[in-house]
Image (spheres, rainbow, N blue to C red):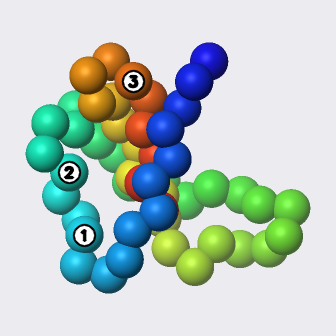
């Protein structure tokens, strides 16, 4: 499965056309993440925004 990962900066919290958007905390083998990740779909492509 292909998933698009988007690395953004502060102030970017709304992605036009993103559907089924949900903020979730993820686990990492490197320790706790600094923030939640935004999961959703964009034109039927799974997207994760960090």
Q: Quadrant of residue 14?
A: bottom left
Q: Which residue is mark 2?
A: 15
**Cα–Cα span, label 1 and label 3:** 19 Å
Position of residue 38 measured from the top left corner of the image (x, y, whole percent): 40, 52
Q: From what the image shows, is residue 23 above or below residue 30?
A: above
Position of residue 20 measured from the top left corner of the image (x, y, whole percent): 27, 32
43 to the left or right of 47: left
11 to the left or right of 40: left
Residues under numbered marks 1 and 3 in contact, where contact means CB atoms less than 8 Å apart: no
Q: Residue at left 55%, top 59%?
A: 25
Residues under numbered marks 2 and 1 in contact, where contact means CB atoms less than 8 Å apart: yes
Q: From what the image shows, is residue 29 above or below residue 32?
A: above
Please, what secondary structure does the residue beneath circle 3 have?
A: strand
The front one of 2 and 31 is 2
3 or 2: tag closer to the N-terminus: 2
Q: Residue at left 84%, top 70%?
A: 30
Please, what secondary structure does the residue beneath circle 2 have?
A: loop
The front one of 20 and 11 is 11
Please identify the residue farthest to the left as the structure is shown. Answer: 16
1 or 3: tag closer to the N-terminus: 1
Q: Which residue is mark 3?
A: 45
Work out which quarter of the rendered image holds the N terminus and state it.
top right
Q: Which residue is mark 1?
A: 12
**Cα–Cα span, label 3 and label 2:** 13 Å
Q: Residue at left 20%, top 51%?
A: 15
């Amino acid at each position: 499965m292909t998933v698009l990962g988007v690395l953004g900066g502060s102030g970017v919290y709304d992605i036009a056309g993103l559907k089924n958007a949900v903020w979730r905390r993820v686990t990492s083998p490197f320790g706790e993440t600094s923030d939640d990740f935004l999961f959703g779909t964009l034109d039927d492509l799974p997207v994760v925004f960090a």
